[in-house]
Image (cartoon, rainbow, N blue to C red):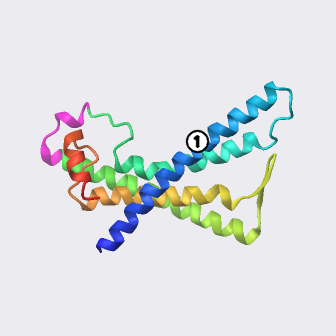
């Protein structure tokens, strides 16, 4: 079980690292495109489409890590005023709903990946790309987001923990 946990953790961290690389490459591509245009050269034809795809991959690869590190916006105005039992019920409800929605989207995305591969459909823009490339990051990202919310559900870790509590419990994962 410990090997499985380490493998899972390395996947989530690797996805976040890949997201960082994608963001850096996207910035370089935009700078090169703008520089070429300003110097009077023909800009790269596929910059806009490539950037759109990169934004999708960046977002979906970073999402599981953001859930894990509590990088999403959380409004605690009402939550902080609740008693412990109500807080736990609310947390459990949120984890179940978020995991269910994320895993349902992952399932639909997986179905669309399979369908796109079978049909051989492509996405025509400035560059032709197989359509399954659009659905693959959704499958990966939402699957791991769902797993992260399930992790919160089945451990004592809390998405709503104070920063010092979160840092303490984060060491285990």
- Residue 8 position by quadrant: bottom left
Residue at the front extreme of this rendering: 39
Please tell me which residue is depicted at 64% across the width and 41% down the height of the picture: 26
Please tell me which residue is depicted at 80% across the width and 50% down the height of the picture: 127
Please tell me which residue is depicted at 82% across the width and 41% down the height of the picture: 45
Placement of 82 over or under 38, stated as above or below: below
85 relative to 71 in the view: left or right: left
Query: Would you say residue 92 sits in the magenta stretch?
Result: no
The reply to whether residue 100 is visible in this rendering is no
Question: Number of marks in the image?
Answer: 1
Placement of 86 over or under 3, stated as above or below: above
Q: Estimate the x, y position of residue 23 in percent, counting from the top left.
A: 57, 42
Query: Would you say residue 83 sits in the magenta stretch?
Result: yes
Depth order, front residue of 95/30: 30
123 relative to 167 in the view: left or right: right
Please tell me which residue is depicted at 49% across the width and 55% down the height of the picture: 15
What's the magenta bit mostly, secondary-structure-wise?
helix
79 relative to 144 in the view: left or right: left
Depth order, front residue of 34/69: 34
- Residue 34 position by quadrant: top right
Placement of 96 over or under 46, stated as above or below: below
Can you say which quadrant of the picture contains the N terminus?
A: bottom left
- Provide the residue designation for mark 1: 24
Q: Estimate the x, y position of residue 25 in percent, counting from the top left.
A: 62, 44
Question: Magenta span covers which residues?
Answer: 77-86
The reply to whether residue 3 is visible in this rendering is yes
Q: Secondary structure at mark 1?
A: helix
């Amino acid at each position: 079980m410990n090997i499985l946990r380490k493998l899972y953790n390395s996947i989530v961290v690797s996805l976040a690292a890949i997201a960082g690389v994608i963001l850096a490459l996207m910035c370089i591509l935009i700078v090169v495109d703008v520089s070429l245009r300003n110097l009077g050269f023909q800009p790269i034809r596929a910059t806009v489409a490539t950037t759109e795809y990169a934004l999708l991959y960046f977002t979906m690869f970073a999402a599981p890590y953001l859930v894990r590190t509590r990088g999403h916006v959380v409004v605690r105005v009402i939550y902080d005023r609740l008693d412990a039992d109500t807080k736990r019920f609310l947390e459990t409800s949120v984890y179940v709903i978020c995991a269910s929605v994320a895993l349902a989207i992952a399932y639909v995305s997986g179905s669309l990946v399979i369908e796109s591969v079978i049909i051989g459909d492509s996405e025509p823009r400035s560059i032709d790309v197989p359509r399954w490339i659009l659905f693959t990051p959704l499958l990966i990202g939402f699957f791991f987001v769902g797993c992260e919310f399930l992790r919160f559900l089945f451990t004592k870790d809390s998405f709503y923990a104070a920063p010092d509590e979160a840092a303490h419990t984060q060491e285990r994962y």
